[in-house]
């Protein structure tokens, strides 16, 4: 909302495009800035968490190496993926609306669908699978992508990690919420983790292409 939409509202975009610069460069530069910023926030958050664990919980450096930093490559790759998806949604909405308020309002369903995924799974019961509610459950879809990235980079998740991911996203099904399995388990399998990852990437890439086409043809 505060990138291309703001620039279009206050006239900055008109001035920028009067310079010898291509429109696709403006679009991709804006998207790239958002992705890099969000990725740096994720990196800073991870380092801050490690620092707090070491200082406040007296966690040893060896434990941090086996815990936080061992999972860091996969976590940072997942953060890059999430930043690209969210950046693509935001930039495409700002191009099609050229208005901060409408961009913000149209983007609201994304966090709502994510947050509502957990109560929908809990209270819908068997209807969750019967009516294919997992398709619009962004909580589940992003959890699937998380599993796909982590297993591709760092191998199979530990039972403890599967338990935590399963309770929040529904990727893994546990009979008892307070019992960690002794061995790794398979995902529930509504759709494979790789399919969720590829689908979200293709959807985001499609939004960027549509935004680039619209941005190239629009009068500013």
Image (spheres, rainbow, N blue to C red):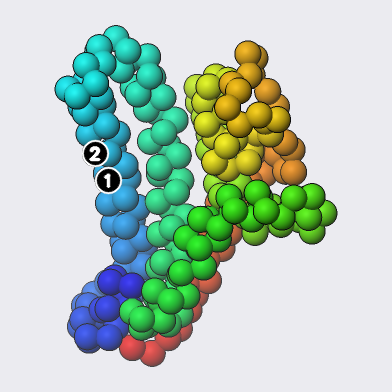
Query: Does residue 60 lie above or below 156 as drawn?
Result: above
**Residue displayed at 60% across by 23% down:** 179
Q: Bin the neighbour count of mark 2 within 10 Å (Cα to Cα): few under 14, some 14-19, many 20 and up.
A: few
x 40%, y 42%: residue? 79
Secondary structure found at label 2: helix
Question: In the drawing, what numbered circle is on residue 136?
Answer: none
Which corner quadrant of the image does residue 168 belong to? top right
Left or right side of 206 for 1: left
Query: At which x and y percent is residue 198?
Result: 61, 46
Which residue is at a point 45% across and 80% down the rendered structure image? 96
- Asked where in the image residue 193 lies, by quadrant, the reply is top right
Q: Is residue 86 left or right of residue 14?
A: right
Q: Is residue 99 above or below residue 112?
A: below
Give the farthest residue toward the left. Answer: 55
Q: x, y percentage for residue 93?
A: 44, 73
- In the image: residue 153, left or right of residue 186: left
Badge number at residue 41: 1
Q: Position of residue 56 (x, y in %)?
A: 19, 24
Labels 2 and 1 touching (C-beta < 8 A): yes
SS label for mark 1:
helix
From mark 2 to mark 1, how far is it between C-alphas?
5 Å
Q: Where the N terminus falls, by quadrant?
A: bottom left
Q: Is residue 198 visible?
A: no
Q: Is residue 152 above or below residue 137?
A: above
Q: Which image quadrant is residue 163 in? A: top right
Q: Position of residue 74 (x, y in %)?
A: 44, 30
Q: Is residue 119 visible in the rendered structure shown here?
A: yes
The disc at residue 44 is 2
Q: Is residue 179 above or below residue 149?
A: above
Q: Answer with left or right where residue 164 lies relative to residue 45.
A: right
Nearer-the-camera pick, 10 or 16:
10
């Amino acid at each position: 909302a505060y990138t291309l939409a703001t620039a279009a509202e206050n006239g900055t975009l008109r001035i920028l495009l009067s310079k010898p610069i291509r429109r696709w460069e403006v679009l991709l530069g804006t998207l790239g800035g958002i992705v890099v910023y969000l990725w740096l926030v994720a990196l800073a958050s991870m380092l801050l968490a490690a620092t707090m664990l070491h200082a406040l919980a007296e966690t040893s450096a060896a434990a941090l190496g086996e815990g936080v930093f061992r999972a860091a490559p996969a976590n940072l790759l997942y953060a890059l993926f999430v930043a690209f998806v969210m950046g693509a949604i935001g930039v495409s909405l700002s191009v099609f609306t050229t208005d901060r308020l409408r961009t913000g309002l149209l983007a609201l369903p994304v966090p709502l669908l994510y947050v509502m995924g957990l109560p929908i799974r809990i209270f819908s019961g068997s209807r969750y699978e019967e009516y294919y509610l997992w398709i619009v459950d962004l909580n589940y879809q992003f959890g699937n992508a998380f599993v796909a990235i982590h297993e591709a980079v760092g191998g199979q998740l530990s039972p403890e990690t599967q338990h935590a991911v399963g309770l929040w996203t529904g990727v893994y099904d546990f009979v008892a919420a307070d019992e960690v399995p002794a061995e790794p388990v398979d995902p529930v399998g509504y759709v494979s983790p790789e399919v969720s990852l590829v689908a979200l990437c293709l959807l985001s890439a499609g939004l960027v292409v549509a935004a680039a086409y619209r941005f190239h043809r629009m009068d500013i």
